[in-house]
Image (cartoon, grey):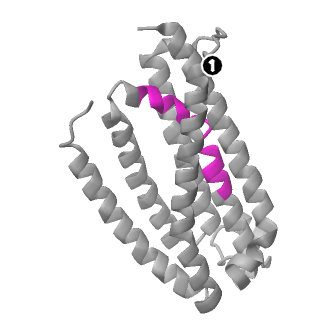
Amino acid sequence: HDDRKIISLMSMYGRLYRIIATIIFAVGMIIAPFLPKIIGDACYMPLPESNIALTNSLFGGLHIGGWVIFGFLLIDTASSYLLAYKRSIIMADQRNYVILSIHTAGTVLMQFLQASLLLITKDIILFLILQVTFRFTENLTLALIANRKYPVITSKEKVPVDDEMKRDIWGNTAALSMHYVGNYAIDSVDTIIISNYLGPLTAGIYANYLLIMKGLRGVMIQFSSGFTASF
């Protein structure tokens, strides 16, 4: 094992992921003022009345439901990149089953608790806080596992990445980022159009059906990937 190369690569991955998180948060803040143009009157909807007194005292009567939900989802997305880079070494060691097991168990537990919270408290804020918490906990758990199994990545030694490898990593990262942006744009444009012309209720119903189809497709992909050889 080339420990110095591992240290340099993980350090660079960490910087890249932090840069991506910062860009996502910044772009989200830039988009926020234009939300009324994207989702219409949904920005000004009141949040559902909660059985939790604290939530009602903070958000009750404020017609900013769209912005509140957008803010939590933005934090959830941006923060997910802060520790996620450490799972790359687990994947490189062909232990993707560790990531999949933790992700699946966490997702099932999170969705059960979210559904229970909505039924009991009718509190969308707690629902979103739970989502952010579970995402961060998943990444933290995987980061701690990576630190324990591969202690070399916890080294504070400054090891530079050679220029050729740095160019390759930056090029691949830029290409992959554009790929993800394109996928999100394709998946989101139809929902934005439906929300603008038919209203957020219709868009929500469509999104629920789309979520079910994506979930089924994801299960089939994970099932079939178990029969695919590693190279």
Magenta segment's dominant SS is helix
Image location of residue 82, percent across then percent down: 62, 37
Image location of residue 53, percent across then percent down: 71, 68
Q: Which residues are magenta?
A: 74-90
* Secondary structure of residue under mark 1: helix
Q: Residue at x 65, y 85 (%)?
A: 196
Q: Which residue is mark 1?
A: 163
In the rendered image, residue 30 lying in the magenta stretch gets the answer no
In the rendered image, residue 81 lying in the magenta stretch gets the answer yes
Residue 202 vertical position relative to residue 7 in the rendered view, above or below: below
Residue 39 vertical position relative to residue 167 in the rendered view, above or below: below
Q: Residue at x 72, y 47 (%)?
A: 23
Image location of residue 43, percent across then percent down: 73, 77
Image location of residue 99, percent across then percent down: 38, 37
How many labels were placed on the picture?
Answer: 1
Task: In this rendered view, identify the residue nearer to me: 193 or 164.
Answer: 164
In the shown orientation, is residue 80 left or right of residue 229? right
Residue with the most extreme bottom position: 198
**Quadrant including the C terminus:** top left
Residue 98 vertical position relative to residue 194 in the rendered view, above or below: above
Task: In this rendered view, identify the residue nearer to me: 38 or 129.
Answer: 38
The image quarter containing residue 131 is bottom right
Task: In this rendered view, identify the residue nearer to me: 142 or 213.
Answer: 213
Identify which amino acid the numbered label 1 is placed on.
Answer: Asp
Can residue 176 be seen? yes
